[in-house]
Image (tube, grey):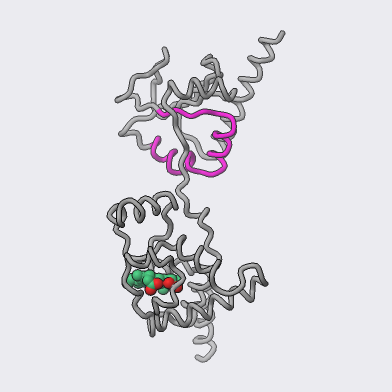
Amino acid sequence: MKNVISFFLLLSSWIYAVEGKHVYEQKCASCHALYIPMSTLEKNFMEMDNRLLQLKAPTMNQIVYRLKSRIGDPSGDEDMHRMEIESFLAEYFNTPDREKSVCLPDILTYFETMPSMKGQLSEEEFEAIVSFLYDYDPKAYQEKVLHYDAFEEASIKALAEDKMIMIFYTAAHCRYCKKMEREVLSDSDVIAALEKEFVSVKIDVEREKNPLDFTPTMTPTFLFLSPEQKQLYRVPGSWVKEDFLEILREAKEKYSQTLKKGAE
Ligand code: HEC
């Protein structure tokens, strides 16, 4: 029986050890947003008096940044720094005290003092949340979105930067377009590949005028143009990441073939 209990204790501490995010969602997310870009936060506080976002508490990206730069010695040994932060938090969670807050005084004026967490976090949960905060990487939570230009802008940019144009034909009811946007066009490798060598345009076939003399027969369809708007490659259908990256490689290949032909 004892073994069974210690097995479950072990198991639960292991679950919490990997799931600091889970503790955050259960116990902190009702007040603290996980990530909001700095530019939006500035607008919210400096210009809009917190009316834009109506935050109840500082966001985790604000807190972690302040915490790690103000508590202990940020340039010293990492394990030491972790411990310094851990003991600061142990005290703050038990007896929150505005006087000791790491938050900017101007920002604090928008908030009440944090309620005490006394008795609300088990030791494992506390450890997990400390790791979660210490290892928090804002890049992991930044919204990843592909930037699209309007066709006119894209044409100018493509020539100026010597990039191909990718046109993504989509439609409001198109489920596979949404799936691709969610799973492929928001992937950081795909975004990096597109931003490096393409200018992207998105056209809703039902609502927007198509600037080209080509009508896609289905959505999604991807059309690749040279910087001079020569149509090089059309690919209808929804693709997984690896296949889509391959399609981008093929599009580049087609473009370099036309360059070679032109040079002959
Ligand atoms: C009921 C709302 C609420 C909940 C729930 C809450 N907080 Fe807070 N927290 C606040 C507010 C408001 C502040 C800013 C005022 C302050 O510092 O006391 C704050 C401040 C903080 C700070 C900065 C401390 C400092 O030096 O100012 C940390 C770190 C923090 N919270 C972590 C957490 C974690 C981790 C959880 C979940 C375990 C949590 N909070 C749950 C409202 C909340």
- Residue 87: x and y, percent? 53, 81
- Quadrant location, ligand no. 1: bottom left
- Residue 242: x and y, percent? 57, 39
Q: Is the residue 110 above or below the residue 53 in the image?
A: below
- Residue 137: x and y, percent? 53, 59
The structure residue drawn at horizontal position 66% and vertical position 71%, both measured from the top left corner, is 76
Q: Nearer the viewer, residue 84 or 217?
A: 84
Q: Is the residue 6 above or below the residue 249 in the image?
A: below
Q: Nearer the viewer, residue 181 or 32?
A: 32
The structure residue drawn at horizontal position 57% and vertical position 30%, both measured from the top left corner, is 248
Q: Nearer the viewer, residue 205 or 235?
A: 205
User: Residues in magenta?
Assistant: 176-202
Q: Is residue 183 magenta?
A: yes
Quadrant in the picture for residue 158: top right
Apparent side of residue 247 relative to residue 172 in the rendered image (left or right): right
Q: Is the residue 242 above or below the residue 53 in the image?
A: above
Q: Residue furthest bottom?
A: 2
Apparent side of residue 244 relative to residue 175 in the rendered image (left or right): right
